[in-house]
């Protein structure tokens, strides 16, 4: 019985992050037993070289373009169908379900032209 209590106490201390050997920190509301223990990850631990951290991606997925333009998938589909100046997508394969990508620079250039067109009509 004593050994079981020792194991239980050790598990509770680990859950409450009372072990100084762990590389964790507690959430701000860590005064309860249901506190969240998160792993600390520093930028130094990343394998991305410093020169490449600020690069834009060359191509964007369909959902990324939706997020960038702040529109829904259906709205982006309508823009593609109705606006002849919108950049054509790049298809990864020949099947219907192949991934669709857009060139980042073409999307940004289209948006700049779209802004000037909308502001010029007023």
Image: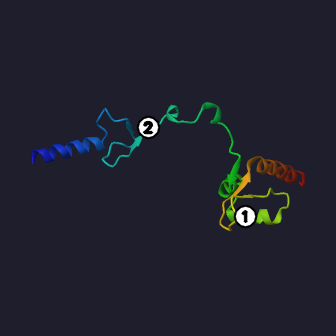
Give the side of residue 89 with respect to residue 16, left or right.
right
Q: Give the quarter of the image for residue 21.
A: top left
Q: Residue at x 87, y 53 (%)?
A: 117
Image quadrant in which the C terminus is located? bottom right
Give the side of residue 46 with respect to residue 11, left or right.
right
The residue at which mark 1 appears reads as 75
Distance from label 2 to label 1 (Cα)? 39 Å
Is any atom of residue 81 visible in this view?
yes
Q: Residue at x 30, y 47 (%)?
A: 33
Say what secondary structure mark 1 lies in.
helix
On screen, residue 48 above or below 113: above
Q: Residue furthest bottom?
A: 96
Q: Earlier in the sequence, mark 2 or mark 1?
A: 2
On screen, residue 68 above or below 14: below
Q: Give the quarter of the image for residue 76.
A: bottom right
On screen, residue 84 above or below 31: below
The residue at which mark 2 appears reads as 40
């Amino acid at each position: 019985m004593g050994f079981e209590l020792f194991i239980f106490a050790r598990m509770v201390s680990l859950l409450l992050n009372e072990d100084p050997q762990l590389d964790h920190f507690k959430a701000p509301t860590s005064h309860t037993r249901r506190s969240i223990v998160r792993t600390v990850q520093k930028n130094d631990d990343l394998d991305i070289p410093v020169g490449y951290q600020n690069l834009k991606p060359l191509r964007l997925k369909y959902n990324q373009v939706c997020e960038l333009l702040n529109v829904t998938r259906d709205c982006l589909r309508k823009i593609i169908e109705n606006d002849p100046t919108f950049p054509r997508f790049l298809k990864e394969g020949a099947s219907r379900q192949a991934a669709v990508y857009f060139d980042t620079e073409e999307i940004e250039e289209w948006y700049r032209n779209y802004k000037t067109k909308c502001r010029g009509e007023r």
